Amino acid sequence: MNKRYSRPARWRVLLVACGVAIGLIGCGSDAALEAPSSTHDQPSQDSASHGHPRGKDASDHDAHEGHGETPDRVELDADQRAALDLEIGTALAGSAEAVVTAPATLRFDADRVARVGPRLRAKVRTVEADLGDTVAAGDVLAVLDSVELGQAKAAYLTAAARYRTRAAAYERDRGLAEDQIVSESDVAESRADYRQAKAERRAARAELALYGMDEAAIDAVDDDSDAPLSRLALTAPRAGRIARRDLVAGETVGPDETPIHVVDNSRMWLLIKAAEKALPRIAVGQTVRFDVRPLPGETFTGRIDWIAPELDPESRSVRVRAVVDNPNDRLKAGMFATARIETGKARDSGAAHALVPIDAVQQIGERAGVLVPGEHAGAFMFTPVSTGAESGDVVEITQGLSPGDALVTAGAFDLKAALTAGGRSAAHSH
């Protein structure tokens, strides 16, 4: 159950433990008085003077005075606590048999990512949006120049002028035909010229649309304008934030490049790698709770919306996707997470215990327990518990801890080492 540590990690714990031990020795019996106090077993005046707690384990302490049980309390200063890299969290409620625990990674929702780039070769004039900027649909992201686009606009202007001329001639000939001034054959020829000009204008507009121009932008093309025909504006196709910007002024980009990414990260994907044996218990619609290391003590929620139809042939795991709301932008793509899928399929669906990380449960002598924060910063106490079923990296606490209670969720082994070392020094100081 306990973690293995590299040589530098062991030295770090040893130094902290020595610091605690020296503090206890220097205080003599007064330090020993503080060491054994517990939230469960309050020491009597008689036992406190010898540094031993009173309660169900009092006889063991008396029988092994000076060499017996370690105390259930330790106090660290700010430097010692920082060295141990402790994390404080809360116990969840549920059943280990009803929870599937698996590693996961956060990703952008692919349906909310827009990759923006030119549809033809162009040179960048200016970049209007930078990384992290919030943009609305239609906002200009960059301004470019393209010779190919200029030629296409010129062809459109020519086609549009011809269309207007042919349309006017056709309308005139139709009126003259009604007065029998021109023949029907003249009207037919005028109609054919009009239809051809209309088709040419339509083809020219379609080419501009293929280059990324919308109807409004095409209608705005005017040969009387001072703006160069080669000018191209890259606009945001959706609202979001600029997550990628890989272009600078003067750079030439092509139609196969998408140098700007606009992302709406108010909703994200949690991609989970669940074990093969958990597959029968996982279903679309189940709730997923997860935590990420950069945000200790916080739990986030999502819902499964997809399960892969095949297993990874190497890891024998199944890919599971959950949709996660991210309204405050606290979650970032690429974060590693520990996901807990609430399957609801336990031995007793009505039983709800405290669920804690397996590494949070430590062994001192014959007792299993967790370390909980004391009444002030730097104080921690060892609380004996009874454990139940395990699933992945979580274990049920059937007695001694309730859902919602605070405890040390990471660094418990280091803290226990400091506690036990301090207890041994206190025992030998009198």
Image (cartoon, helix red, strand yellow):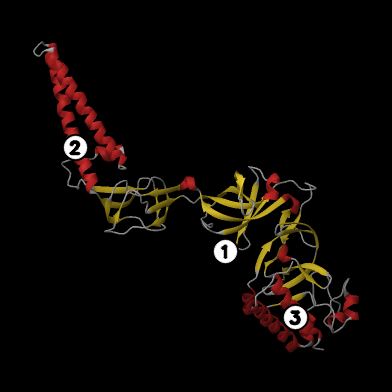
Quarter of the image with the N terminus in it: bottom right
Tell me: 407 left or right of 61: left
Alpha carbon separation for disc pair 2 and 1: 57 Å
Q: Secondary structure at mark 2?
A: helix
Dot placed on the residue nearer the N-terminal end, 3 or 2:
2
How many angstroms separate mark 3 from mark 2 (CA)?
Answer: 87 Å
Name the image quarter holding residue 22: bottom right
- Residue on which the image places disc 2: 157
Tell whether 203 sits left or right of 393.
left
Q: Which residue is mark 3?
A: 421
Instruction: Tell me: residue 117, above or below residue 193.
Output: below
For mark 3, give the secondary structure: helix
Seen at 28% across and 52% down, the residue is 143
Earlier in the chain: of badge 2 and badge 1, it is 2
Mark 3 Cα-neighbour bin, 10 Å: few <14, some 14–19, many ≥20: many
Task: Name the residue nearer the viewer: 299 or 253.
Answer: 253
Against 133, is 65 above or below?
A: below
Is 54 above or below relative to 110? below
Foreground tag (2 vs 1): 2
Looking at numbered disc 2 in the image, what kind of residue is underneath it?
Leu
Can see residue 95? no
**Label placed on residue 294:** 1
